[in-house]
Image (tube, grey):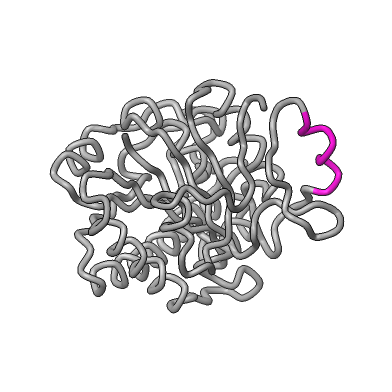
Amino acid sequence: MTTFIKLGGSLVTDKRQAKSFRRAAVQDIARQLLELRALQPNRPIVLGHGSGSFGHIEARKYNTIHGVRTAEDHLGFARVGAVASELGQLILNELLAADLPALRFQPSAIQIARDQNLVHLDTRPLALALEKRYLPLVHGDVALDESLGGTIISTEALFAHLVEPLQAKSIILLGNVDGVLDQHGHVIPHITADNISCYESVLGSSDGVDVTGGMQQKVREMLDLAQQHTDLKLVIANGNNSRILRELLVEGVKVGTRISSSE
C-alpha cells in the first residue's frame, strides 16, 4: 500500500526569507529514499512538498487563496504557480542527482477547485507512475476555481484527495521540528479527536509565512482524514533526522506526533 511523504516548506526552505532553498536537507531525504527503495523495493511512495518561502510569500502578496478576479490577481496567480514550480524543479533535480526515478506532476494542470475546495483531480497518471515504479513528486499549487477564478490547494489537501484512488496507508509530514510541540516545547506523542481540545491553544501557526494555515490547519486536516479513514497511519516528524524514514517505515520506531481518530 502507498506511503505519502511530505517535505514541509519549513524543511526545504527558510520560510522567513524569499526563495531560500535548503538543498542539503533535500539531498539527505533523497539519500534516505534511495536507501528505503533498496530495503523495500515494493513500497509505492508519493513524495510531496510545501511551497515554503517560494509560493507562500508570493501568494500572500496577491491574496491568491481567496480568489482571482482582477487583472492583477490573474498575474499574481500565474506568478504563484511559477514559483511553486521553481521549487519543485529544484527538488526534482536533487532526487534525480541521487538516481531516484522521480517524475514531477504539476497539480495545477490536473486539478480543479470550487470555493477553495478540491473537487477534481486526474489521478490516472499518478497511479500509472506508481505501477511502473516511478517516484511521483507533487506539491501545493494554484488551482483554477470554478467559483473564485483561482485559489491555492495545499499538499495536505492534495494528499487527502489521493488517499482512496492511490490506496494510501500512511502519511508522513516532515518539518523542521520533532513533531507537534506543547507549551513547554515537548513533543505531543498522540493527537486524537478526544484530546485535540487540550492542545488547540498551543498549536499556533507556522514559523514564517504560510497562507494555508500553519500547524493548526495541518493537524486539523490530518485529524479529519484519520476520522474518514480509520486504518490510515499519520505522523508529523522531524525531517532533519538523518534516519527518520528508516525509523518510521523500516524499524517501526514511534517518533514524532501520531494522529488518529481515537486511542
Q: Is residue 69 magenta?
A: no
Task: Say whether residue 96 is left or right of residue 241.
Answer: left
What residue sits 32% from the left and 53% below the top?
A: 137
Which one is nearer the viewer's eye here, 240 or 76? 240
Q: Quadrant of the C terminus?
A: top right
Q: Main secondary structure of the magenta part?
A: helix
Q: Is 205 placed above or below 198 here?
A: below
Residue 200 is drawn in which quadrant? top right
Which residue is situated farthest in the left direction here? 132
Q: Quadrant of the N terminus?
A: top left
Image location (x, y in percent) of residue 41 = 21, 50
Tell me how many marks there are: 0
Which one is nearer the viewer's eye here, 213 or 57? 213
Task: Say whether residue 62 is left or right of residue 111.
Answer: right
Residue 62 is drawn in which quadrant? bottom right
Residue 85 is drawn in which quadrant? bottom left
Image location (x, y in percent) of residue 122 = 29, 32
What residue sits 40% from the left and 66% below the top?
A: 29
What residue sits 48% from the left and 60% below the top?
A: 244
Q: Is residue 196 magenta?
A: yes
Task: Say whether residue 237 is left or right of residue 48.
Answer: right
Image location (x, y in percent) of residue 123 = 28, 33
Image location (x, y in percent) of residue 258 = 61, 41
Task: State which region is magenta.
Answer: 195-202
Task: Say whether residue 55 is left or right of residue 197.
Answer: left
